[in-house]
Image (tube, rainbow, N blue to C red):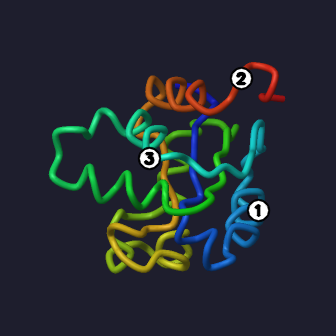
Amino acid sequence: MSNLTFGIIKPDAVRAGNHGKIIAKVLANGFKIRGMKLIHQSLKDAEGFYAVHAERPFFGELTEFMSSGPCVVLALEKENAVPAWRELMGATNPAEAAEGTLRKEFATSIGENAVHGSDSDENAAIEIAYFFSKLELV
């Protein structure tokens, strides 16, 4: 199990001005930030990142949303990082997310759910490499 995972503070949370609060919760939950930057993906960038979902019915809506405004990409370190980050994020549907999770506090819908997180160590490595060079990881 890896100690690194990848996260995104999505455009809805950045637009609402919640990215600072989310970063504070990330740090308060024992994560170390190894890479962080504010970006604005093009539609092509978002389509590349979410290519695994290209055949899914929500692909167009997802990539349009993810390219609709700035987001914060994060490389996070903690023991058992992937499950720890997924637990902090909460359920995809904020109505089903546990109290104290990021999605319960900051998400507005299943589609605009404030944060993204890797679902496996393998995908975390791929996703981190998509947005960060080795020089950008400290």
Residue found 41% across the figure and 69% down from its top: 112
Q: Residues within 10 Å of mark 1 (few under 14, many from 20)?
A: few
The picture places residue 53, in percent across and down from the top left corner, at: 26, 40
The picture places residue 84, in percent across and down from the top left corner, at: 55, 48
87 or 104: nearer the viewer: 104
| N-terminal-most mark, 3 or 2 | 3
Residue identified by numbered label 2: 133
State the mark number for residue 9: none
41 or 121: nearer the viewer: 41
Residue found 34% across the figure and 67% down from its top: 111
Residue identified by numbered label 1: 28
Residue found 44% across the figure and 29% down from its top: 123
Q: Is residue 113 left or right of residue 75?
A: left
Instruction: Describe the element under mark 1 as helix, strand or loop.
Output: helix
Q: Is residue 12 left or right of residue 112?
A: right
Type of residue at label 3?
A: Leu
